[in-house]
Image (spheres, rainbow, N blue to C red):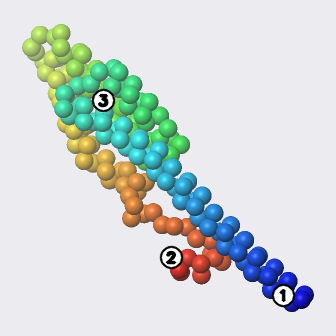
Amino acid sequence: MTLFFSIATLFLSVAVVVLAWQQWRVADTKLRLDLFDRRYKVYDATKQFLAVIIREARFTHSQLIEFNIGTSDAEFLFRADVVDYLGQIRKRAVHMWTAQRLYEPLPVGDERSRHVMAAHDDLSWLSDQITAMTKTFTPYLGFANVRSRVVPFLKFFSASR
């Protein structure tokens, strides 16, 4: 009878370990999915802002605020490369906006041409970013980089996947 209880206890312990491991995997997967969703929102806010700039060759103050709000969590979700990239987009957009405001009231001449060229250069760079931004965000959003993490001593359980 003692042998029966010992074997039953052993099987029960193994079952508890398996359930705990499965719960850990579910929690880990949920965490990675939540992180992906939050990162994608930053990507989408950037893409929407750049789309407005490409479509209209300008943007409103409220659109810049939407971009700032949509990307405000980037420093918590990404490494410095993406944070710096978003800062560069913001800086070039504001520079373009400023150059446009400066040349609009000016008469045709050298100063106006200088501001028009500055705005054009920024617009051209920002337009290129709608496709270039994919390279910057891919390491964080690409599914090819998503692997299930497995605790080393539990690798034999993952073989059944």
Of labels 1 and 3, the one closer to you: 1
Count of residue discs: 3
Of labels 2 and 3, the one closer to you: 2
Q: Quadrant of residue 11?
A: bottom right
Residue 22 visible? The answer is: yes
Q: Position of residue 79 (x, y in %)?
A: 49, 49
Residue 88 visible? The answer is: no
Question: In this figure, which residue is indicated by the disc labeled 1?
Answer: 4
Helix, strand or loop at label 2? It is: loop
Q: Residue at x 27, y 48 (%)?
A: 132
Residue type pointed to by label 3: Ala
Residue type pointed to by label 1: Phe
Helix, strand or loop at label 1? It is: helix
Q: Is residue 13 found left or right of 144 in the rendered image?
A: right
Helix, strand or loop at label 3? It is: helix
Question: In this figure, which residue is indicated by the disc labeled 2?
Answer: 161
In front: 113, or 26? 26
Of labels 1 and 2, the one closer to you: 1
Q: Residue at x 46, y 51 (%)?
A: 36
Residue type pointed to by label 2: Arg
Judge the density around disc 2: few (<14), some (14-19), many (≥20) Cα neighbours within 10 Å. few
Mark 1 near mark 2, Cβ–Cβ under 8 Å? Answer: no
Q: Which mark is residue 93?
A: 3
Give the mark nearer the N terminus: 2 vs 3: 3
Q: Position of residue 2 (x, y in %)?
A: 90, 87
Q: Is residue 73 found left or right of 3 in the rendered image?
A: left
Q: Position of residue 51 (x, y in %)?
A: 25, 36
Q: Residue at x 31, y 40 (%)?
A: 47
Q: Is residue 7 found left or right of 124 in the rendered image?
A: right
Whole-angstrom CA distance, mark 1 to mark 3, is 74 Å
* Rendered position, 55 above or below 111: below
Give the mark nearer the N terminus: 1 vs 3: 1
